[in-house]
Amino acid sequence: MTELADRFIRDGFVQLPGALPEALARTCESLLWEETGYDPADPDTWVSPTHWVLYRADEPFVDAVNSPTLVAAYDELVGPGRWLRRDHVGAFPLRFPSDEEPAESGWHIDAAFPDRELTDDDLESVETMREVGFRVNVNSRGRALLLLMLFSDVGTDDSPTRIRVGSHLDVPQLLDPYGSDGVDSHALGPMIEQASAGRPVAHATGRCGDVYVCHPFLVHAAQTHRGTQHRFMAQNAIEPADALDPRARRPLSPVEQAIRAGLND
């Protein structure tokens, strides 16, 4: 097993500096500024603490999520042919300096599958998506990886995502009793916050173009933006091409191995 896979199984994430070519990442950054309607040079125009962009499906973003460095990581952590190529990127919580605490500041994992078929109306905005019930199960149906893609430089004061290191190992035993149907992600929140409370905290800081490749069960949270610069990031899922199964009688991918380790089977 490689060092990358070892760190992923142990910590629940790996940081890949420069996973996106800088010119490409900066192009995406400029396009995201256009989405906000704000003037990058005039902080007085940054009127909202968070500006949500649901997704982008244009070429720079699709090239970014399918960069050679990231594709190699998907192959190593999920398995060649076992993940689906992305045709869009999102969602983007674009954050700006503010004393206001983000709605996503509670410790959580990202849900993996909706409890009903999505409609075009659901996909209109982040607000309509929040009205949909989402679930997660022990096999991580619908999600093989979580990507935190930095499209700006992010320092310690710039609202970097907080990460509980190793917390992905606390989640499988909580999910196992719910079987394949899984559990509503909101109901799971208090349980995973308590189960992972003793884990050390890291912060997703870095340069524009860095990517944090995370286990889907990694417990994380937003935080208040105390800095002076914008913080642009994408939260992106890599979907499995076939069902993950940590109890399968075959060689397991690092994603599955981590779930198996958390189950203590």
Image: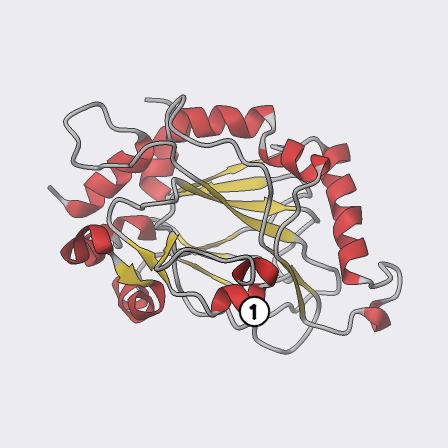
With 122 as the anchor, is 107 left or right in this view?
A: left
Residue extending furthest left?
A: 265
Q: Amino acid at mark 1?
A: Glu
Image quadrant occupied by the N terminus: top left
Quarter of the image with the C terminus is top left
Residue 219: give x, y in percent of width and height: 38, 56
| Residue drawn at point x = 14 percent, y = 44 percent | 264
Tell me which corner region of the image, top left, top right, bottom left or bottom right, holds residue 25. Answer: top right
Q: Is 99 displayed left or right of 14 in the figure? A: right
Asked whether, in this view, residue 140 is left or right of residue 36, the answer is left
Task: Return the x and y of residue 197 as percentages of the image width and height.
Answer: 31, 64
Q: How many marks?
A: 1
Q: Residue at x 32, y 45 (%)?
A: 141
Residue on which disc 1 sits: 127
Residue nearest the viewer, comparing 197 with 58: 58
Q: Nearer the viewer, residue 117 or 133?
A: 117
Tell me what residue is drawn at x 50 percent, y 58 percent: 119
Residue 3 appears in the rendering: no
Q: Is residue 72 above or below residue 247?
A: above
